Image (cartoon, rainbow, N blue to C red):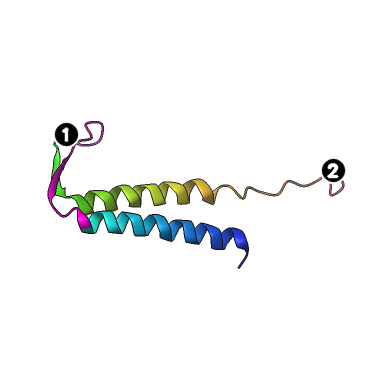
Amino acid sequence: MNFKVLFRLLVFLAIFFVMLYIGMNNTERITFSFPMAFAKDIHTQAAFIFFGIFAVGVLGGAVLSAGSGGGKSRSSKEK
């Protein structure tokens, strides 16, 4: 395991810990409004909202980083 992968894992776990800690300490119900995606406001516990936002961010980051490798182009010597 190289340093870059280990560093990304540690950052991911730190962000996950903060999200979990915030969710554990904010158990009251909140109103979440996002008119572009939902016609009605969402009334639920804060932990569910935090987890949903975190999950969307993780999925978006995974999609963006999945295409970062790119295909290796052939050099002019290989032609």
Q: Are marks 2 and 1 in contact (CB under 8 Å)?
A: no
Residue at 55%, 47% in the rendered image: 67
Q: Could you say where residue 19 lies in the image, as x and y percent from the top left?
A: 32, 54
Boundaries of the magenta span:
25-38
- Establish if 33 lies above or below 58: above
Q: CA distance from mark 2 to mark 1?
A: 55 Å
Residue at 70%, 49% in the rendered image: 72
Density class for disc 1 (Cα within 10 Å; few <14, some 14-19, many ≥20) is few
Residue at 21%, 56% in the rendered image: 25
Residue 28 lies in the magenta-colored region: yes
Q: Main secondary structure of the magenta part?
A: loop
- Establish if 39 lies above or below 71: above
Q: State the residue lying farthest toward the top.
A: 36
Q: State the residue lying farthest toward the bottom.
A: 1
Q: Which quarter of the figure is the N terminus placed in? A: bottom right
Circle on res. 3:
none
Which residue is tagged 2? 76
Nearest to the observer: residue 37 or residue 31: 31
Q: Nearer the viewer, mark 2 or mark 1?
A: 1
Q: Could you say where residue 77 lies in the image, as x and y percent from the top left?
A: 87, 47
Q: Identify the amino acid type marked 2.
A: Ser
Residue at 34%, 52% in the rendered image: 55
Q: Does label 2 or label 1 sit earlier along the sequence?
A: 1
Secondary structure type for disc 2 = loop
Q: Identify the amino acid type marked 1.
A: Ala
Q: Is residue 63 left or right of residue 39?
A: right
Circle on res. 39:
1
Secondary structure type for disc 1 = loop
Tell how many labels.
2
Nearest to the observer: residue 29 or residue 73: 29
